[in-house]
Amino acid sequence: MKERDSMIITFCGHSQFQATERVERELLLLLEQKVGDASAELYFGGYGAFDAFALACGQSYKAKHPGTRLV
């Protein structure tokens, strides 16, 4: 059986974003459902509230899934 290639996920959002625990749970659940234990590259911007939120979620996800690369 062929091993699945690394998934690439890009996050983009608004510079003015209000993070909530609910949105964080939903984003992490989505990553679990779509990526699981497969390898993945998560791409983030470097400006604004959404980018900071997405990066924090990516770091939480990576802590449980070491095959994840944050870019």
Image (cartoon, rainbow, N blue to C red):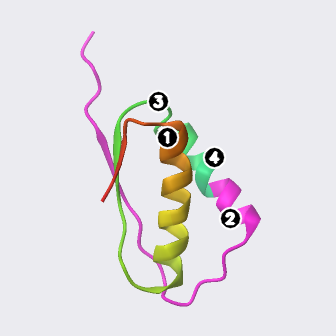
- Closer to the observer: label 3 or label 1? 3
- Closer to the observer: label 3 or label 4? 3
Residue type pointed to by label 3: Asp
Measured Cα–Cα span from mark 1 to mark 4 = 9 Å
Whether residues under marks 3 and 4 lie with C-beta atoms below 8 angstroms apart, the answer is no
Measured Cα–Cα span from mark 3 to mark 4 = 13 Å
Image: magenta residue range:
1-26
Ranked by sequence position, the earlier of labels 2 and 3 is 2
Disc sitting over residue 29 in the figure: 4
- Rendered image quadrant of residue 42: bottom left
Q: What crowding class fits label 4: few (fewer than 14 Cα within 10 Å), some (14-19), or many (20 or more)?
A: some
Disc sitting over residue 42 in the figure: none
- In the image, residue 67 lies at what x, y percent? 37, 35
Which residue is tagged 1? 34
Q: What crowding class fits label 2: few (fewer than 14 Cα within 10 Å), some (14-19), or many (20 or more)?
A: few
Which residue is tagged 3? 37
Q: Is residue 30 above or below residue 5?
A: below
Disc sitting over residue 23 in the figure: 2
Query: The residue tagged with tag 1: helix, strand or loop?
Result: helix
Whether residues under marks 2 and 1 lie with C-beta atoms below 8 angstroms apart, the answer is no
- In the image, residue 10 lies at what x, y percent? 36, 61
